[in-house]
Image: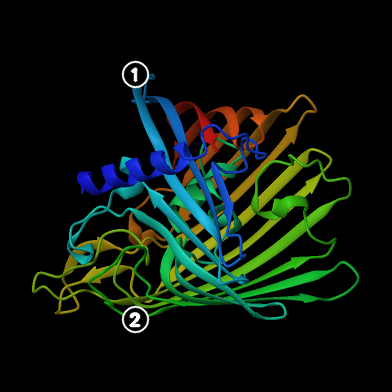
């Protein structure tokens, strides 16, 4: 495996060195390589990126905060390729993850191999405002999850997203947009997928996953697709709003969080299955440097506690059900400094045994080249069941060609 990646690295270096003496008209943040075939039969954009993080965490023992725990990581390191093939109406995206967090999750259902592939998807604009997507990519879930990790307002996503999102899966998606007036736009997104998350090779266990999402933009589209990028870097001159609603049904789900978590394997080797339903309601608003994002999520399951074949003895696996609220806002100064705040609550169903959680986060960012080159920091205060629990300070930078 190391040998294969060495070959890839050598190939990339060789490709870039071919034009090392030429002056390119591209600029930082627009991709390391932008190439269009002379006959316009294909194009490719190559944009590597990485994020480095430091974290210090203080836990409360009931009387005082103890000594901090420190952690330094390469949070994400990725290679992204996109463009079109044969026709501008047939687009593709391929994204590979290289950091430990990107590739973790090896198990018997992916042949115990690293999960390098994040996205491998074709997008075909087959008629008018209709697009058909096929492959592995993000499902049309909550807005915070679909926003790229490269375009975040705070150091990382919220607890709502980490506990209740529906993430990437392998399948097909049908997308359409409808003009309801002079500026009013509606977008419809539907997906049928495997239901077990990315890079699964030994499937399909359980049933399929069905997702539908509606988005309403009453004041027209955002600049530079800003409805799926946090912070108002474009400083919208007029108010812009997106309202989104998602319904997800994972039939006979076999993992604790549908697409992720442990497989609920019984003692006899069979897998416990239960129907899981997740709904989201979210909003994105931007105007003149101010941005706001709000999200509500709720997950239910026919059976929260996984049981053995006798239907009474617990296996020890619990489906993570409950609801969450996430509110986030920020203001970008003309100097490209930004302050932002976030409030998140998690309320689980009693059967899960998980305690209600509240988190308060305050952050500051300096955008040097937009989201492509930035320095960010935030501090979070987290409580479990109303008791003091933890203070965490994070700092890091993003570098994105």
Give the residue displayed 62% in from the left and 34% down from the top: 23
In this rendering, does residue 28 appear at all?
A: yes
Q: Quadrant of residue 387?
A: top left
Rounded to the nearest angstrom, the CA distance separating label 2 from label 1 is: 46 Å
Q: Quadrant of residue 287?
A: top right
**Residue 159 coordinates in the image, percent (x, y):** 48, 46
The residue nearer to you, when weighing 119 against 295, is 119
- Horizontal side of 55 relative to 256 (left or right) equals right
**Residue 129 coordinates in the image, percent (x, y):** 71, 77
The residue nearer to you, when weighing 37 against 114, is 37
Task: Tell me if mark 1 has few (under 14), some (14-19) or many (20+) residues whose alpha carbon lies within 10 angstroms of its own.
Answer: few
Q: Quadrant of the C terminus?
A: top right
Q: Earlier in the sequence, mark 2 or mark 1?
A: 1
Residue holding disc 2 = 207
Q: Is residue 4 above or below residue 63?
A: below
Residue holding disc 1 = 66
Q: Is residue 259 above or below residue 247?
A: above
In this rendering, does residue 98 appear at all?
A: no
The residue lying furthest to the right in this view is 182
């Amino acid at each position: 495996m190391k040998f294969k990646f060495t070959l890839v690295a050598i190939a990339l270096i060789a490709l870039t060195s071919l034009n090392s003496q030429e002056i390119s008209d591209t600029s930082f943040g627009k991709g390391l390589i932008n190439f269009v075939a002379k006959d316009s039969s294909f194009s490719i954009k190559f944009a590597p990126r990485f994020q480095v993080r430091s974290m210090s965490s203080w836990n409360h023992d009931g009387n005082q905060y103890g000594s901090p725990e420190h952690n330094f990581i390469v949070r994400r390191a990725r290679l992204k390729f996109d463009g079109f093939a044969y026709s501008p109406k047939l687009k593709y995206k391929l994204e590979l993850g290289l950091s430990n967090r990107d590739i973790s999750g090896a198990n018997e259902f992916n042949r115990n191999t690293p999960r390098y592939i994040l996205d491998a998807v074709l997008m075909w604009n087959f008629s008018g405002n209709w697009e058909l997507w096929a492959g592995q990519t993000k499902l049309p879930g909550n807005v915070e999850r679909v926003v790229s990790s490269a375009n975040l307002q705070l150091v990382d996503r919220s607890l709502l997203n980490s506990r209740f999102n529906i993430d990437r899966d392998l399948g097909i998606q049908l997308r359409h947009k409808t003009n309801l007036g002079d500026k009013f736009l509606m977008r419809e997104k539907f997906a049928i997928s495997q239901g077990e998350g990315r890079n699964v090779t030994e499937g399909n266990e359980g049933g399929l996953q069905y997702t539908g999402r509606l988005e309403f933009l009453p004041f027209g589209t955002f600049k530079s697709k800003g409805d799926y990028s946090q912070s108002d870097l474009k400083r919208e001159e007029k108010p812009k709003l997106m309202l989104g609603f998602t319904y997800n049904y994972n039939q006979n789900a076999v993992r604790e969080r549908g697409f992720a978590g442990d497989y609920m394997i019984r003692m006899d080797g069979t897998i416990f299955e239960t129907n899981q339903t997740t709904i989201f309601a979210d909003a994105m608003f931007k105007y003149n440097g101010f941005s706001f994002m709000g999200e509500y999520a709720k997950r239910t399951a026919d059976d929260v506690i996984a049981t053995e074949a006798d239907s009474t003895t617990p296996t020890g696996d619990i489906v993570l059900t409950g609801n969450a609220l996430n509110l986030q806002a920020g203001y970008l100064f003309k100097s490209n400094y930004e302050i932002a705040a976030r409030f998140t609550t998690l309320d689980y169903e009693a059967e899960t045994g998980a305690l209600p959680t509240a988190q308060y986060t305050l952050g500051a960012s300096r955008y040097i080249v937009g989201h492509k080159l930035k320095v960010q920091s935030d501090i979070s205060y987290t409580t479990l069941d109303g008791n003091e629990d933890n203070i965490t300070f994070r700092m890091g930078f993003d570098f994105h060609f």
